[in-house]
Image: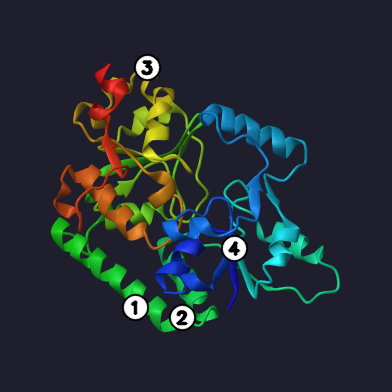
Amino acid sequence: MRIVSLLPAATEWIAAFGAADDLVGRSHECNYPPSVRSLPAVTSAGFDVTGDSAEIDAAVKDTLQQGLSLYDVDVDALRSLDPDLVVTQDQCDVCAVSFSQLKDAVAAWGGDAGPDLMSLKPATFKEVLDCALRLGRRIGRATDAMRVIADGEMRLQRLRGLLGIDRRVDPESLPSVACIEWLDPLMTAAHWMPDVAEHAGARCVLSEKGEASPRIDFDDLRAHDPDAIAIMPCGFTVDRTVADLDRLTSRGGWRDLTAVQNGRVAVLDGDAYFNRPGPRLVRSCELLASVVHGTDDVLSTPIEDGERIWLEETPQATS
């Protein structure tokens, strides 16, 4: 099978299922596993992605107000790859090429039959796994998909055991965490993130499971005063977030927050782990647990460079 994946999470699942050799093309955002970077990219961003969080937000709004697409699909390049299947999403037009845009692109091929199209739209952790299994079946890797998902569940069981929690634990008794998905404007992470937090022995504040990520006021964050704060802007690495961190930490009252006072604030790699619903969400649960509970004993493997940095270790904190 010849597969083009326009969704980073789908690319990761396909590789995890042992079908990386079936990939013949990708989106410009598909960067893991590293081997996929050698594949031709058939999409590009239609707005400037190099600015800080406020500049990117303004660029996205401007592009949409002009009635333009946020992403461009190279129809000729896509067609030349002769794919049997093209995978994308229909959840967020800001995150990746939408299903409707992909359908329009394929329709432009004219009379040719064209590839099959598949759209993934998970909103909760369970739906992430359901979509992964559906993808595995579609590419003839159902057994591999079930094995990968089962391995992930075993890691989550280990994590819950280390934390001393089970399904009977009252979520309200767990430490609270605010998961910051964007810095300016300020947004918290929703969709599957409240589930990730629960696996990590915590409860999310200012976001609802399965819902879109909401914009919040800083006063809302101060009012909820969470026990921990995990900063994971969508599409940002740790280094890129640190460079933009003063958008949050310079606000009045920041240093008075309980999480700041207790050293439970960390910057995490949102792009690699938390923003994309792929197989690395299990690692996301472990990383978030390490922040909420302040220990690396919950990690199945040692922390790697670029996964997490504590607030007090950032240049802003030490300057």
Instruction: Identify the residue under disc 2.
Output: 141
Q: Residue at x 72, y 57 (%)?
A: 101
Q: Earlier in the sequence, mark 2 or mark 1?
A: 2
Instruction: Identify the residue under disc 1.
Output: 147
Q: Earlier in the sequence, mark 3 or mark 1?
A: 1
Question: Mark 3 against mark 1, which lies toward the viewer?
Answer: 1
Question: Mark 1 against mark 4, which lies toward the viewer?
Answer: 4
Q: Are dots 1 and 4 in contact, CB under 8 Å? A: no
Q: Are dots 4 and 3 in contact, CB under 8 Å? A: no
Looking at numbered disc 3 in the image, what kind of residue is underneath it?
A: Gly
Q: Are dots 4 and 2 in contact, CB under 8 Å? A: no
Quarter of the image for residue 35 reads bottom left
Q: CA distance from mark 4 to mark 3?
A: 47 Å
In the image, 153 versus 148, the foreground residue is: 148
Q: Residue at x 71, y 55 (%)?
A: 74
Instruction: Identify the residue under disc 4.
Output: 25
Q: CA distance from mark 4 to mark 2?
A: 19 Å
Q: Residue 265 at x, y = what percent?
A: 27, 34
Can residue 167 be seen here?
no
Quarter of the image for residue 149 reads bottom left
